[in-house]
Image: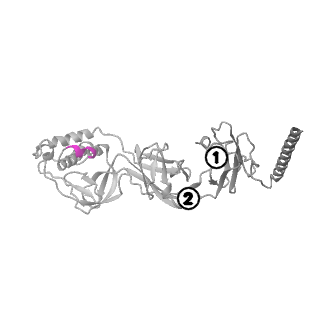
Amino acid sequence: MKMFKKTFSLLCVLLMSITFVFMGTVSAASNTAKLAHTGASPKYIGNTDVYNLKFDDGTVVYCYDGADVTWPPAGVSYTRSKAASAGVRYILEHGSSSHQNSQVASYITQGAIWWFRADNEGGRKLNEEFTTTGAESVTGIRNKIIALANEAKSASGTVTDVTVDIAIKDADMKLSDDKNYYVSEEFTATVKGASSYKVDVTGVTGAEAMTTSGNVKTTFNANEKFLIRIPATAVNKTASVNVKVSASGNKQAYVYTPSGSYQSVVGLFPNEDSKTAKLTATVKNKDQVCVDYVIVGNVIPDPAKTDPTPGKNCYDKGTKYDQEKGLTTRQENCKFIGWHTKKDLTGKWTNGTALNNDLTLYGAWDCGTPIVVPATAANTPLVILGVGLAAIATGLVVYFKREKKLNANK
C-alpha cells in the first residue's frame, strides 16, 4: 500500500576510491627460465631416444634443433628468443593426443618437430635410421610422426597476445532499492586476444560481480560490462575489495636459447593477462532529519476502512520532500484533508520544500461533522468566538423553552 510519495535521495552513499594495481602482464612466457628436469625416453625407433624436458615452472619443452645436437643438463639457463612457427605450434598443441601412452605421445611430438623443421624450416637433417631403417618398438610410431608433421604444414596464422584493461566512469557506489547491497557503477573491460574474461572479487565476504541487468556471475563475454556489489551488512565505515579481471587465449609457442652450446628448446606457454583494481569504499552518512506524522481532531473514521496513521520517517537533510495530496481511503463519507505544519491545521505542507530540521506534520479527517482541534495561540480567538456562540445558542435554547412553558400555562 502506498501511503505517500517519496522523492528523496538515499539515506547514505558509498564513496569509493579506486586504485588500479596493474599486475605484471603474463603474456605468453617469461623472458628467462631454467631447465629443471631431464631424462631419456625409451628408444622407440632404432637407437634414437629423446629427452623429457621441463622448465622450473613445470612447463614441458622439446628440443628444437635436432637429434644430433648436445642435450642440455638440468640447471641450464634459457632466454626467450622468438615465437615458433604456426606449424611447430600445431605439433605442440596436438602431439599429446597422438597416442594413449603419454610417453609415446611425447616421443611422437619430439620426432614431428624435428621432421617438420627439416622439411620446411631448414632444420637439421634427420638420420636414415630414424626416418627409414630403424626398427620400431611401438608399431606405427614412425607413421604417426610423419602424419603429425604433414598436418602441421597446413597450419597458419599467429596467436594474438592477450591484453586486459579495466576502467570505471564514476567512483560512487549506491544503495540498492532493497537496501541489501552497495552497487558500483559499470566497469568496462577491454579485452584483446580472448573471447571472454573472468572477474574475481576478494576482500569482503559476499562481494561479487554481476551483469548490468543484475545477474551474478564470474565469466563475462569480452564485450560485456560488469558491476560490483558489496553486502550492506559487510560495510561499517570502510570496506576494501580487490577486483581482478583476467583473460586467457590460445597458448603461445616460444623458442628459448641456452646459455651454453646446447639444444634450443620450444614449448607452449600461457597467453593471459590480468589487471586488478583495488576499491576502497567509505560510507558517508548524511545528516538526517525526521518527519513525524500525527492525526489530530475528534473525527476518527472506521480504522478497518482507512489507511493506518503514518509514523516517523527520516531522510537526508536538504531533501526536497513531496507528500501526496491525501491518503488512500475506503471511507464512504470521509476524506483526508492533507498534512499541515501546525497542530491547528494551518500551514499546509508545500510539496518540494526542503527538509532542514526535524518536523511534525499534522493531518485530519473530514467526515461531514465539525473538526475540533486543540487550542493554540494561533486559533485562540476562534476558540473564544466558538465558546461565545455556543453560550448564545445555549441561552436562546433556554429562552425559547421558557417561553414555550409560559404559553402552555396560560
In the rendered image, residue 387 lying in the magenta stretch gets the answer no
Q: Which residues make up the magenta segment?
A: 92-98
Task: Give the x, y percent position of residue 43.
Answer: 13, 51
Q: Residue at x 46, y 43 (%)?
A: 224
- Which of the two discs, 1 and 2, sits closer to the camera? 1
Task: Give the x, y percent position of residue 87.
Answer: 29, 43
Residue 276 showing in the rendered view? yes
Task: Give the x, y percent position of residue 228.
Answer: 48, 51
Quarter of the image for the C terminus: give it. top right
Q: CA distance from mark 1 to mark 2?
A: 22 Å
In the picture provided, is 65 more to the left or to the right than 189?
A: left
In the picture provided, is 201 more to the left or to the right than 300?
A: left
* Image-quadrant location for residue 207: bottom left
The residue tagged 2 is: 283
Q: Nearer the viewer, residue 351 or 327?
A: 327
Identity of the amino acid at label 2?
A: Val
The residue tagged 1 is: 7
